[in-house]
Amino acid sequence: IKPPLDGKEVYEPGEPLRFEMVLVGKCRDLFPYVIVSFNELGGRGIGVGRGRFDLGPVECLDASGTPHVVMRAHNEVVHTPQQEIRLEQAPEWEQDRVRVRFLTPVLLKERGKWAQPTFGALMKRLRDRINALSYFYCGMPLEMDFRVFGKRAEEVRTVHQDMEWVEESRYSKHRGITQKLKGWVGEVVYEGDLQEFWPFLWLGQYVHVGKAAAFGQGWYECGCDS
């Protein structure tokens, strides 16, 4: 689930709350059950005071970002999304620079140590995450030379960086402990031969990268350096 990042915590009656959800591979078939769960949650209420809600229209984005309605507001008919976002659907990229903006803290490990997001570290962790998701949820591991891919990624250099270290706390009610979520946020501009790596960068915007990606860390946007 990808919530809004505006920090808003209070929603008045009638005020919409919009969020995104990413379903990987075979999980797409579970979409109708996800909708049923949210409908039941709306009836029970969430947050302090158990505020109740109705589920509005649900749209599915295709690889170009075009929305397709899969459920209309107050409608019990739910259509399983047919749209997919895959590596090979990445738009063409012909530039030698790319700007990556980390929206939530990113924490990458390089040679056994936590490191700032160099392009090599970023692409190796993206490679591993996308391969794991593809294998476990799509039944298809990536067919590529992992070592050569990582070596070539190390040749792309950082030409601009505006990052800061942040730490946040997350309370786990299930485990009864407070966990630290930490990492780097900000912008980095990379320069080099990006053709091979662009599909991974593009897809990674949806699935995040690095430690605690399942908790929302490692969320980023990428695009032209302009």
Image (cartoon, grey):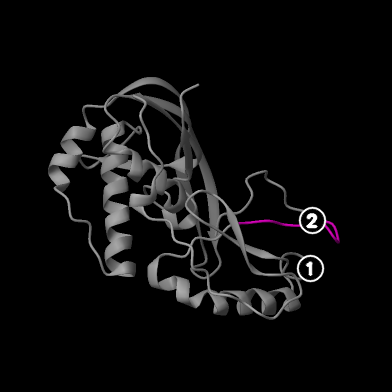
Check the image and report above or below for 77 versus 214. Answer: below
Task: Report helix, strand or loop for mark 2.
Answer: loop
Residue at (79%, 56%) from the top-left corner? 11
Q: Using the image as rendered, state which of residue 166 and residue 159 is in the foreground.
A: 159
Residue at (22%, 61%) from the top-left corner? 141
Question: Residue 166 placed where, x, y %?
Answer: 50, 36
Q: Quadrant of the N terminus?
A: bottom right
- Residue 18 falls inside the magenta stretch: yes
Circle on res. 11? 2
Q: Earlier in the sequence, mark 2 or mark 1?
A: 2
Check the image and report above or below for 40 versus 104. Answer: below
Could you tell me if the residues under marks 2 and 1 are in contact, i.e. CB atoms within 8 Å? yes
Kind of residue sitting beneath label 1: Gly
Question: Residue 193 placed where, x, y %?
Answer: 26, 27
Check the image and report above or below for 131 versus 189. Answer: below
Task: Report helix, strand or loop for mark 1.
Answer: loop
Residue at (56%, 67%) from the top-left corner? 173
Kind of residue sitting beneath label 2: Tyr
Report, in whole angstroms, how far the alpha carbon at label 2 lies from the one at label 1: 9 Å
Question: Left or right: where does residue 126 sit relative to residue 162?
Answer: left
- Residue 5 falls inside the magenta stretch: no
Question: Left or right: where does residue 18 sit relative to residue 202?
Answer: right
Q: Main secondary structure of the magenta part?
A: loop
Question: Residue 104 placed where, x, y %?
Answer: 51, 42
Farthest residue, direction top: 159
Question: Residue 179 placed where, x, y %?
Answer: 48, 54
- Residues shaded magenta: 11-19
State the residue position of label 1: 51
Q: Using the image as rendered, state which of residue 17 and residue 134 is in the foreground.
A: 134
Farthest residue, direction right: 13
